[in-house]
Image (cartoon, grey):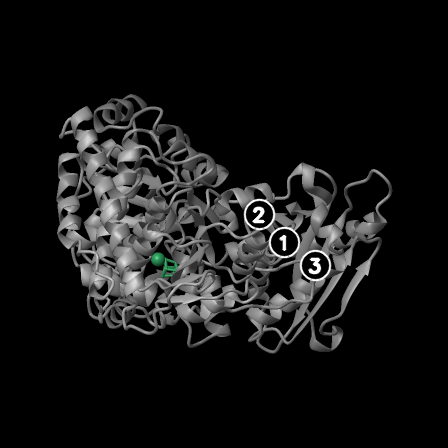
Amino acid sequence: MSKIVAAAAIRGARAITKEAEDSLKKAIAERGPETKIGFPDTAFFLPMANALLGLEVKTLKEALVPLNYAKSLLPAVPKDNLWLPYLGDALDAGIATLLSEEIIVVLRYLYNQEPQADCNGFFTDTTIRSLGIQLVDGRMPGFAAILGAAPTNEIAVEIVRQLQERNILIFVGSSSNGRSIIDQLKESGVEMGWDTYIVPYGRDTTTAIYPLNWAIRSAMTFGGIKAGQARKCLLYTKERVFAFGLALGLVDDLKYATGAGAINMGFPVIADTDIPEIKPSGITTYEALVKEFDYKKIVQRCIEVRGVRVKVSKIPIPVLYGAAFEGERVRREQLYCEFGGKSSQAFELIVTRDSDKIEDGKITLVGPDIDQLPEGKKSLPLGVLVEVAGRKMQKDFEPILERQLHRFFNYCMGVMHIGQRDINWIRISKDSHAKGLRIKHLGIVLHAMIHQEFGAITDKVQVTLFTNQEDVDRELAEARRVYVERDERLSGITDESVDTFYSCELCQSFAPNHICVITPERVGLCGAYSWLDTKAAYEIAPAGGNKPIAKKECIDPVSGEWASVNEYVNMRSNKAVERFSLYSIVNNPTTSCGCFECILAFVPEANGIMIVHRDFSGMTPCGMTFTTLAGSVGGGIQTPGFLGVGKIYITSKKFISADGGLRRIIWMPKDLKVSLGEKLVKMAEEIGEPGLVEKIADETNATTTEELLPFLEKVKHPALTMPPLI
Ligand code: SF4
Ligand code: ZN
């Protein structure tokens, strides 16, 4: 270890620990030792202190414990002639820095000084969980934390674009020479936020703790590691969280100290200045501290140093392409041309053809392109017809492929896609048009992406794009016929009508004992996988995360228990789970990983069950918020009385049918009722309880059991007269 680096890191650590101590003393003097402190929406208190020391810091007084621990770690600053053979001292300084920074920022929350303008501030538990799937399936291969500022705004933009194109989530912040990359990106009109994969944390180095205390929580959330198991947490982040730091501009003492903290977590730091490098150390997978002066190469260098596995698909179109652009909007001011929505009629359809009827790679535009728009016009009708052929292609896969069109369109920078089928809506931005993007490129994208992601079932992909009104009208009539036929076929598929269910084991990488058993009437709890999806996934990639489970030896049709399912689950859950009831929350309910869209919880006072969804941050009648509930339900265990489910399952006939189904539901947030809409109303009618939806309380009637019970009595909720649940 370079002694220059060690000395700088130790100096930085001493200074920041002193700052934490001064701020904490001041806060205790001003507000009193018992004053509550904490970050918004987290079950992990001060996450670093929680993960590394097992502490649950809730008050100013309790913050003294991690502070004193940090102080005890502080090594002396080495003299110039002293040789430090090990990283040891600098690493301790790094841990002291993380603990101190966390105290400083939580105090800023107490004084309403965080989040800073245009910044996210503390990253909540919800953001970890909602990124869960993307982290697992490789759509998001890594994280970059950028500190400082690039020499010019153009270079700043160039660096984040390169990272975006590789789908790397980017945290931007800190400053060098009084300048922050946040402002460089802002001035260049770069859209920032979770949707665009560019998240500003704060303009000083202390706030770099946000991405780090976010990363450490993933060890506890997804790795099932207990608070206080410091070594395990740090190993987990090294092995599972592909993060790195990128220091732009001068690296001062505090950046060295924070960098030393990151290195403890296995995250290397790459700088664009002449710093002393630290070669392989064992703490990080490859190098720990590296310099790279060439901005064209710096992103590639980061990726190599951290060992990030990036799947880049180079598609020959004139704009950037990647998942990072999926959430980007095209607003009215940026609008060059749109299709569908309120402006015109559009549709998209994927159909299967005989192989000799189509030609692979043939992209045809019938009608004018967007550069032939009449003066003052900003919209065109658009029909997108994708014809595919393949020996393993099945009609049932068409809707699955079709649903991906949304993503494939949105990955184009400057293209926004909303909706599906004949209610789709596509916008193209002025910038992208200026770069040369034309309608035909959309066809090129679809052809390339279908081959790339569904190569196992599609041999040929042909795309025809229609922009004349009469062609769109004619093709649309045919498309609508196909939509209706599909819906009729799919609505006929029930749990009884099939002989195979499917497993989904994708979440085992972070919840090793968890399995979703997916049936036609019960989606995976993340809501992302239906029975058809898993069936298709299995046929496309038999070695993947979805396996067929033959439906054999029914033990109980009411609770939904099959011997073959139990056997499979037992085998694949490392023998942790013996029985699964697919339709019950009480007896041997299924396990929950952490990705559930909604949580069901038994409310004994009301003899019923409440539901809360992920986006609802308020209090619920069981006395817990979604986040707190999620902490006790997740991790791949069975928790009778609690269950994670996919949203759409609520409107299924098999929805906890063993426990009384929808009739048991006594509370759910208003937003959830609205988003389930007609489907919920219809299901209530089908079970012979018209008007049930109004009898289900929401946060406007009750947020405690004291408020809930009188409401349920007043509306004569059926749950009150049902047999006891337990
Ligand atoms: Fe994870 Fe279940 Fe969703 Fe599969 S279906 S990704 S196992 S939550
Ligand atoms: Zn999951």
Q: Residue tagged by mark 2?
A: 328
**Residue drawn at point x = 15 percent, y = 52 percent:** 53
The answer to the question of whether label 1 and label 2 lie on touching residues, with beta carbons closer than 8 A, is yes
Q: Residue at x 20, y 65 (%)?
A: 88
Q: Is mark 3 in CB contact (under 8 Å) with mark 1?
A: no
Between 128 and 551, the one nearer to me in the picture: 128
| 489 to 120, vertically: above or below | below
Considering the numbered disc 1 on the image, is that residue within a helix, a strand or a loop?
Answer: loop
At label 2, which amino acid type do we have? Glu
Q: Residue 442: which numbered mark, if any?
A: 3
Quadrant position of the N terminus in the picture: bottom left
Q: Is residue 674 left or right of residue 241?
A: right
**What numbered label is drawn on residue 413?**
1
Is 310 on the left-hand or right-hand side of 636?
right
What amino acid type should be assigned to the residue bearing mark 3?
A: Leu
Q: Earlier in the sequence, mark 3 or mark 1?
A: 1
What whole-number distance in Å separates the C-alpha atoms at marks 3 and 1? Answer: 12 Å
Q: Earlier in the sequence, mark 1 or mark 2?
A: 2
What residue is at 42 percent from the left and 41 percent from the top?
120
Ligand 1's quadrant:
bottom left
Q: Residues within 10 Å of mark 1 (few under 14, many from 20)?
A: many
Residue drawn at (58%, 41%) of the image: 187
Q: Does any portion of residue 585 appear in the rendered image?
A: no
State which mark lies toward you, 3 or 1. 1
